[in-house]
């Protein structure tokens, strides 16, 4: 095994010997629907043409309601930056495992580096992946620590602007709520996260392994850059659907907080990554999140979810993961 690989096999094998296996989700990709998500051309937002702009906004809103997921092209982030970002990511993950693990010796949610899922009690809860989960306010220190180029910071800045642009369109459509009034001073760089994911190839004999177990995102909005390998799937109408990589597109999805704020108008949809037997895969997710004391309150009545602070939401997730191995998320906050 390469010295940069985390000991996923070791942990996974031990999990398989447990007697109390919960029912495993099928990760078999055969027989799955593969379809194109809504693809939105964002070039129209800055075209100066009001009709095109309106049309683009409508597509974003419809996709957020119907799918909770869409892809965007002409997003304003240049190809070269995305290529450089991936090179930096390769460099980052090629460091010896012990060096990466040093950034978080207990593999806890508080450090930058995470691998697998130490709270997993069965294979179904184990993610065949490693990640650096970095608060945006620490990106600069993080890249110095890991000798990365300024691309990582530059990307964080542009992707943050893109996320705000999309969030404003979605929020303005909610009528009484305006992003500017409600979120401008709550979603700040220090409260957002950049997550760099790497999915090592997974031996075929471990057919039940998932690259990243099914989850919804703990964010308002997530913007994802994935490489060309594929493996991301989302749940639609009770079935898993593959999100085919589009080299020109970024993937945007609604997180739990937007679902609660919009009172269920926009959907925070379950998604996962299936493990790949042959190739490693990289992705980078940007999560727009508010400050911890922000209260997430539904924009209309009767509300599906009770009001909660982001702090409370995160604490509940941590408790649930610790005690059950799984994030429960929004269902905990149903009225
Ligand atoms: O790697 C992917 O395609 C998805 C990553 C993801 O869902 C996450 O980091 O929350
Ligand atoms: Fe996610």
Image: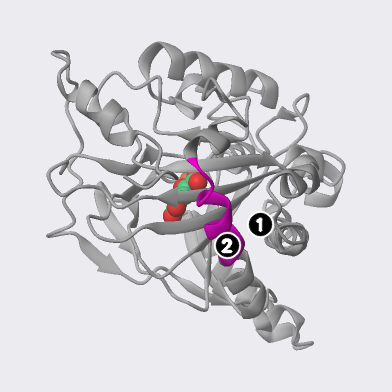
Spot occupied by residue 175 in the image (x, y as percentages of width and height)? 72, 52
Does residue 305 appear to the left or right of 163 in the view shown?
left
Q: Residue at x 17, y 20 (%)?
A: 21
**What residue span does the magenta drawing correspond to?**
87-96
**SS for callout 2:** helix
Which residue matches tag 2? 61
Q: Residue at x 45, y 41 (%)?
A: 130
Q: Main secondary structure of the magenta part?
A: helix
Q: Position of residue 71 (x, y in %)?
A: 50, 68
Report which quarter residue 42 is drawn in: bottom right
What numbered label is drawn on residue 170?
Answer: 1
> Can you tell me whether the CB of the residue at mark 1 lies under 8 Å from the nearest atom of ligand 2?
no
Residue 133 percent coordinates (x, y): 60, 40
Closer to the chain start, of discs 1 and 2, is 2
On screen, residue 53 above or below 10:
below
Mark 1 touches mark 2? (CB < 8 Å): yes
In front: 305, or 284?
284
Look at the image and tell me whether residue 177 can be seen: no
- Disc 1 element: helix
Residue 116 quadrant: top left
Residue 274 in the image: above or below residue 37: above
Q: Quadrant of the N terminus?
A: top left
Residue at x 17%, y 13% (from the top left corner): 20
**For residue 50, what is the image quadrant?**
bottom right
């Amino acid at each position: 095994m390469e010295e940069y690989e985390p000991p996923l096999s070791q942990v996974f094998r031990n999990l398989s010997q447990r007697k109390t296996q919960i029912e495993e989700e099928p990760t078999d990709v055969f027989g799955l629907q593969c379809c194109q998500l809504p693809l939105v051309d964002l070039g129209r937002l800055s075209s100066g043409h009001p009709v095109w702009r309106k049309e683009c906004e409508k597509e974003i809103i419809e996709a957020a309601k119907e799918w909770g997921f869409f892809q965007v092209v002409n997003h304003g982030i240049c190809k070269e930056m995305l290529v450089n970002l991936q090179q930096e990511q390769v460099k980052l993950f090629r460091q010896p495992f012990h060096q990466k693990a040093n950034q978080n010796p207990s593999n806890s949610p508080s450090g930058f580096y995470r691998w697998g899922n130490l709270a997993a009690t069965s294979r179904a809860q184990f993610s065949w992946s490693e990640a650096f989960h970095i608060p945006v306010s620490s990106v600069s220190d993080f890249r110095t620590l890991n000798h990365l180029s300024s691309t990582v910071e530059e990307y964080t800045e542009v992707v943050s602007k893109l996320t705000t642009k999309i969030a404003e369109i979605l929020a303005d459509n909610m009528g009484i709520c305006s992003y500017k009034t409600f979120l401008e001073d709550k979603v700040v760089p220090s409260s957002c996260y950049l997550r760099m994911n790497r999915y090592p190839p997974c031996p075929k004999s471990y057919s039940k392994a998932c690259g990243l177990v099914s989850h919804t995102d703990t964010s308002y909005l997530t913007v994802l850059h994935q490489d060309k390998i594929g493996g991301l799937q989302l749940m639609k109408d009770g079935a898993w659907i593959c999100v085919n990589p589009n080299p020109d597109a970024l993937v945007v999805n609604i997180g739990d907080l937007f679902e609660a704020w919009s009172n269920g108008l926009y959907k925070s949809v379950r998604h996962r990554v299936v493990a790949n037997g042959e190739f490693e895969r990289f992705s980078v997710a940007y999560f727009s999140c508010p400050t911890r004391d922000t209260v997430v309150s539904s924009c209309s009545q009767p509300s599906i979810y009770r009001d909660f602070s982001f702090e409370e939401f995160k604490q509940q997730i941590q408790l649930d993961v610790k005690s059950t191995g799984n994030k429960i998320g929004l269902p905990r906050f149903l009225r």
